Amino acid sequence: MSSASFKEALDLALELSADERAALAHDLLASLDGPADADAAQAWEAEITRRLDELEGGQAKTIDADEALRRIDKNLSRRR
């Protein structure tokens, strides 16, 4: 694509509404991804089921969001 074509496409895109620009940006970014992993949905379903089973069976426990964020901050500060 030439610079003129790019500039023209950009000018047209900037005339869109905010929602339309957001949708366009999403679609453009998605186009940079590789093909979807055909097994990903099944793998996520299995992982979700496993985690729910652990919670319901008492093998895992939850913590509140503030505690989770505190732990994340602590771990990140150790890496710096």
Image (cartoon, rainbow, N blue to C red):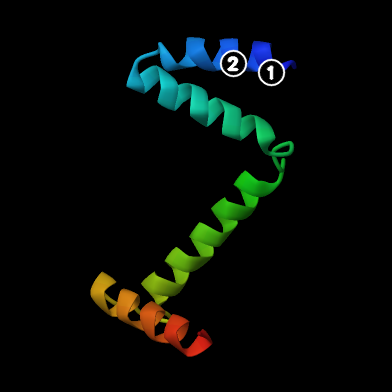
- Who's the residue at 40% across and 17% down the image? 20
Q: Vertically, is 4 above or below 44?
A: above
Report the front residue among 40 and 76: 76
The quadrant of the picture occupied by the N terminus is top right
x, y percent for residue 72? 40, 78
Q: Vertically, is 56 above or below 25?
A: below
Label of residue 3 in the image: 1
Q: Is residue 27 at all visible to an observer of this figure?
A: yes
x, y percent for residue 52? 43, 64
Q: Vertically, is 53 above or below 75?
A: above
- Residue contact between numbered discs 1 and 2, judged by CB atoms under 8 Å: yes
For badge 1, the amino acid type reads: Ser
Report the front residue among 49 and 80: 80
For badge 2, the amino acid type reads: Lys
Q: Is residue 2 left or right of residue 25?
A: right
Q: Vertically, is 23 above or below 16?
A: below
Furthest residue in direction front, as rendered: 4
Label of residue 7 in the image: 2
